[in-house]
Image (tube, grey):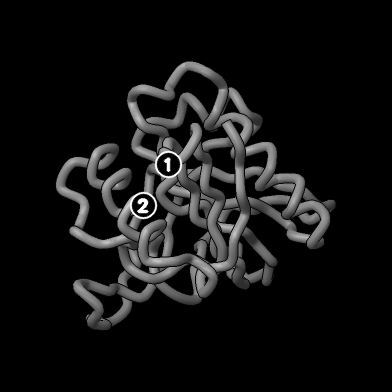
Amino acid sequence: MRTHKTTEHEIDAESRAAIEALLGECFPGYPARDHFKQLPHFRYLVRDGDTLVAHAGVEHRMIRNAGVPLRIFGIVDLCVAARARSRGCASRLLAEIEATARAAGVDAILLFADDPRLYLANGYQRVPGDARWLMIHEHESLGAAEKHVAETMVKTLSAEPWREGTLDLLGHLY
C-alpha cells in the first residue's frame, strides 16, 4: 500500500469518484459527494495497487480554545475500506498527519469521533465540552450553533495546553 498526500485542488475526477465511493462505503448515509460540509485543505489517499482503500481529509485553521487562539489540523472523514482494515493503515495515517502537523508548527490535532478507540490508542484525549461553530447544511450557511459536544478528541503537539472552556471552531463543524 502506498500513501499520497495531495492538496485539494490537485485531485482529479477519477480520484474524486473513488473518494466518494469509499466515503459512502465507510459512512452509511453519507452525502453522494467527496466531502461532507466543506472541502478539506489537503488529503491523504492510500491505494492498494490502483484501488483507493483509505482516506483522511485535513483542515488547517485557527480555533479558539477557552479564549486562546490555536493553530490546528482538523481530521475529516478518516476511513479505511473493510477489505483493508486491521493492518495498521489508520494508525499510519494518523502518524503521517501528526508528522506534517509538527513540521508545520501546529498546536494540536482535533477531530470528532463517534468511536474513539483508534484515537485513544494513538495518544488522543477525549475533551468533551461546549463548542461553537457555523452550521452548514447542503452548502448553505444556517447560522451559528453552540452546544455540548461529547465526541471531541485532541492531541496537543506544542507547549500550549488544551484548556477547559468553550471551543470556538471559527467555522464549520467537520
Does residue 168 appear anywhere in the picture? no
Q: Secondary structure at mark 2?
A: helix
Q: Is residue 146 left or right of residue 2?
A: left
Instruction: Give the residue type at disc 2.
Output: Ile
Toward the top, the furthest residue is 86
First reached walking from the N terminus: tag 1 or tag 2 = 2
Residue 167's disc is none
Please provide percent x and percent y for residue 108. 68, 53
Identify the image quadrant of the C terminus.
bottom left
Who's the residue at 24% across and 39% down the image? 25
Q: Is residue 108 left or right of residue 37?
A: right
Above or below — where is 63 with respect to 153? below
| Label 1 close to label 2 by CB (< 8 Å) | yes
Please provide percent x and percent y for residue 31. 19, 58
Q: Is residue 148 left or right of residue 45?
A: left
Does residue 55 appear anywhere in the picture? yes
Out of 105 and 27, give the one closest to the viewer. Answer: 27
Read off the residue under disc 2.
19
Identify the image quadrant of the N terminus.
top right
Instruction: Give the residue type at disc 1.
Output: Leu
Q: Is residue 150 left or right of residue 157?
A: left
Please provide percent x and percent y for residue 161. 74, 51
Read off the residue under disc 1.
52
Question: Which of the 4 quarters of the picture holds residue 119?
Answer: top right
Who's the residue at 50% across and 62% down the image? 166
Who's the residue at 41% across and 57% down the image? 15
Question: Which of the 4 quarters of the picture holds residue 124?
Answer: top right
> Crowdedness of circle 2 by 10 Å Cα count: few (<14), some, many (20+)?
many
Please provide percent x and percent y for residue 95. 68, 37
Q: Secondary structure at mark 1?
A: strand
Spatial separation of the CA atoms under disc 1 and disc 2: 7 Å
